[in-house]
Image (tube, rainbow, N blue to C red):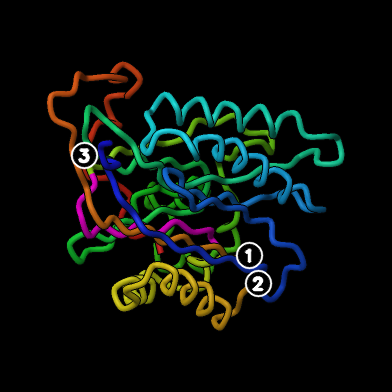
Amino acid sequence: MNPPLIEVVSGSATDAGLRRRINEDSHIASSPVFLVADGMGGHQAGEVASAAVIAAFAELVGGPSTSTMRDVRQALERARHRVADLPLAAEGAGTTLTGVVLADVDGVGCWLTLNVGDSRTYLLSEGELEQISVDHSLVQELIDSGELDPVAAASDTRRNVITRAIGGGSNAEADYWVIPAQPGDRVLVCSDGLTGELGRGRIDAILQTEADPQAAATRLVHEAMLHGGRDNITAIVVDAVAVHTRENIAPHDVDDVDEDTRPRVGAGGDRS
């Protein structure tokens, strides 16, 4: 039997925080799926929406060790339908979604990153931490247009206004990035409860100090609590311990990959 294209170890941690009674974050950290969904809507509606989305992607677990773009898009479509079909008690429920799915792209093991909303996915590779996802938020749009300084954005009262979601009245598409994996890569997937409390420098220091992914995830959440814990906090840390390629493999699923999702270095930069 061939080994999986990407062999990983991972750790995850989550907490409701110090001000919220209910944890509306949901997550999955089971190969090939590593995702965080941050629910919104109040009155437990966000909790229901985020759980429904993660359940749709959980169906990829237990199948092939890597997925395809088609698999991920089908899972996202299932997720949208499940949120749309929630009972009236959860009316207005929605959720962000971000993370990576281990993908097989023409025999190359890749981090297939997807994002809807302002939860974030980072890649630490060769000692450099990069934000792969781009926030779908009003503040980020103002930063991109030059109307808001990135430093001022951290305290802007509009920082929680998101421009894309699954549910919550939004039908916006996800962003995708396909990044060839390398041995030693470390991926962080987190809700904004983490990045709202810890800056990029502190996140980088923890990821580079804590060798064990579970210890890194636990410490990230713990330090976010110490810095205020004003929101639900979730962190997943995924390490690539080995990366393989399949030789003499025929190209497949290429038609389902948009031009801007072919293997390349992801964009995003420092949004902290």
Q: Earlier in the sequence, mark 1 or mark 2?
A: 2
Mark 3–mark 1 distance (CA, rounded to whole Å): 32 Å
Q: Mark 2 or mark 3, which has the lower sequence index?
A: 2
Secondary structure at numbered mark 3: loop
Looking at the rendered structure, the kind of residue marked 3 is Arg
Where disc 2 sits, the SS reads loop
- Left-right relation of 88 to 228: right
Percent of width and height locating residue 5:
26, 41
**Number of marks:** 3
Question: In the image, what residue type sits under mark 2?
Answer: Gly
| Rendering coords of residue 6 (x, y %) | 28, 46
The residue closer to the viewer here, 56 or 2, is 2
Residue sitting at x 43%, y 40%: 114
Whether residue 54 is visible, yes or no, is: yes
Q: Amino acid at mark 1?
A: Asn
Q: CA distance from mark 1 to mark 2?
A: 5 Å
* Residue stretch in magenta: 181-192
State which quadrant residue 244 falls in: top left
Residue bearing the label numbered 3? 264
The residue pinned by badge 2 equals: 17
Does 175 lie within the magenta span? no
Q: Is residue 198 left or right of residue 42?
A: left
Quarter containing the C terminus: bottom left
Q: Quadrant of the N terminus?
A: top left
Query: Which label belongs to residue 39?
Result: none
User: Circle 1 is placed at which residue position?
Assistant: 232
Disc 1 vs disc 2: Cβ atoms closer than 8 Å?
Answer: yes
- Few, some or many C-alpha atoms within 10 Å of disc 2 (few <14, some 14-19, many ≥20)? many
Q: In this rendering, is residue 88 above or below 137?
A: above
Q: Residues within 10 Å of mark 1 (few under 14, many from 20)?
A: many
x and y, in percent, of residue 157 in the image: 60, 63
Circle 1 SS class:
loop
